Image: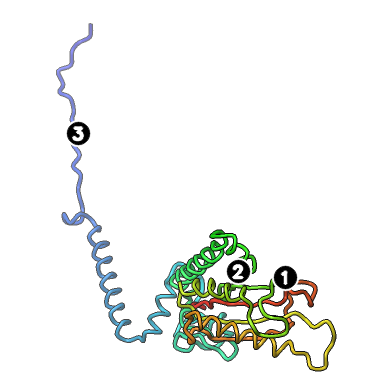
C-alpha cells in the first residue's frame, strides 16, 4: 500500500470577462437601426401621400402588388415602362383610363381590375338570367297545352345576354303567311315570355328572321317582312306590360341567318328576344 499524499488538490478558477460595458453587446444597435429605418419609411410614406396624385398612388400600389408581374396601364409615372404599357399599344397612360385610338378600355379594365367586382357582377347576372331560363322552360310541365306551346321555344345564354328564340313548325306558324299578323300561338307565347322578362330589369332587343323565297324575286319582301314582324313582336310585348324604354333594338334580319340547312324551311321563321347584359 502506497504512501498517502498530503498535498491539497489544485483548483483553477477562470473568470469570464463580459465586454461591452454591461450593455448586452451590440443587440441594442440592431433594434435601434430597425426603429430608425421604420421611422424613415413612415415619413417617406407621409411625404408620398402628400406629394402624389391619385393616379400616381395607384401606380405605386400596383408596382408593389405581389399578384401583378408587370406595370398596369394606370402606372401614371416613369417606371420600368416609362409610363407605357403593353396593354395599350405602347401609348402613354392617360390618367388611368388606358384609352387608345384603336381600343377604348373602361376604367376598371384600365386599372387592371379584370376580376374582383366585375367577375362577381357577371356571375350574379348569369345566375339571374339562368333563373329566368329555368323558370321559362319549366312552364312546359304545367299542362299539356303549355307543353305544346313551349315546344316552340329554346333559350341560350350568350355574351350578349339570354336569347329566347321562338320558332315556327310546319303546322303551327307564328304569323299568317306573308304577313305580320300574329297567330294565337304567338300571342300565347308572348304572354309567357313577358311574364318571365318582368323578373329582371335588363334591356331588351327584338329580332325577326324569315325563310327564303322559293324563287328569286326582283323585289324580295324578306327585309320588309322581317322588320314588320320584329316591330309586331315589340308591340305585343308592350301590350303585355313590358316598358317601352326597355326595348333598345328592333331588327329585321331577313333570310340572311337561316337556322337550318334548307333556307326555305319554316323553321327559319323565328323571333329572338334578347335580355341584354348590363355588365360588359
- Which residue occupies 60% across, 68% down? 155
Q: Secondary structure at mark 2?
A: strand
Disc 3 vs disc 2: which is toward the camera?
2
Q: Vertical placement of 17 versus 173: above or below?
A: above
Number of other residues with Cα within 10 Å of mark 2, as a class: few under 14, some 14 to 19, many 20 or more: few
Tag 1 secondary structure: loop
Q: Residue at (74%, 82%) from the top-left corner?
A: 255
Residues packed near mark 3 inside 10 Å, few (<14), some (14 to 19) or many (20 plus): few
> In the picture provided, is 190 more to the left or to the right than 220?
left
- What residue does disc 3 label? 12
Considering the image in quadrants, where does the N terminus appear?
A: top left
Residue 171, disc: 1
Q: Residue at x 84, y 87 (%)?
A: 216
Residue at coordinates 50% horizontally, 79% vertically from top-left? 240
Which of the two labelled residues, at mark 1 and mark 2, occupies the earlier sequence position? 2
Residue 87 at x, y = what percent?
56, 80
Return the residue at label 2.
156
As measured in the structure, the alpha-carbon distance from the residue carrying label 3 to the one carrying label 2 is 95 Å
Amino acid at each position: 500500500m502506497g504512501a498517502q499524499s498530503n498535498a491539497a488538490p489544485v483548483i483553477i478558477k477562470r473568470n469570464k470577462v463580459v465586454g461591452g460595458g454591461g450593455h448586452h453587446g451590440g443587440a441594442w444597435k440592431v433594434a435601434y437601426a430597425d426603429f430608425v429605418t421604420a421611422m424613415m419609411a413612415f415619413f417617406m410614406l407621409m411625404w408620398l401621400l402628400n406629394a402624389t396624385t391619385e393616379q400616381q398612388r395607384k401606380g405605386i400600389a400596383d408596382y408593389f402588388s405581389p399578384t401583378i408581374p408587370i406595370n398596369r396601364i394606370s402606372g401614371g409615372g416613369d417606371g420600368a415602362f416609362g409610363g407605357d404599357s403593353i396593354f395599350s399599344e405602347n401609348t402613354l397612360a392617360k390618367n388611368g383610363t388606358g384609352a387608345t385610338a384603336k381600343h377604348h378600355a373602361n376604367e376598371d379594365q384600365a386599372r387592371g381590375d379584370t376580376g374582383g367586382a366585375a367577375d362577381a357582377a357577371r356571375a350574379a347576372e348569369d345566375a339571374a338570367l339562368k333563373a329566368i331560363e329555368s323558370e321559362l322552360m319549366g312552364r312546359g310541365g304545367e299542362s299539356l297545352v303549355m307543353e305544346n306551346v313551349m315546344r316552340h321555344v329554346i333559350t341560350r345564354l350568350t355574351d350578349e345576354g339570354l336569347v329566347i328564340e321562338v320558332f315556327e313548325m310546319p303546322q303551327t306558324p307564328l304569323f299568317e303567311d306573308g304577313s305580320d299578323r300574329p297567330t294565337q300561338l304567338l300571342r300565347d307565347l308572348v304572354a309567357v315570355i313577358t311574364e318571365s322578362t318582368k323578373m329582371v330589369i335588363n334591356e331588351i332587343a327584338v329580332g325577326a328572321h324569315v325563310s327564303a323565297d322559293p324563287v328569286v324575286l326582283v323585289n324580295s319582301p324578306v327585309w320588309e317582312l322581317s322588320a314588320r314582324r320584329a316591330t309586331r313582336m315589340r308591340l305585343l310585348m308592350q301590350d303585355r306590360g313590358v316598358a317601352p324604354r326597355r326595348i333598345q333594338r328592333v331588327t329585321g334580319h331577313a333570310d340572311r341567318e337561316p337556322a337550318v340547312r334548307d333556307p326555305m324551311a319554316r323553321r327559319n321563321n323565328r323571333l329572338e328576344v334578347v335580355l341584354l347584359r348590363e355588365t360588359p
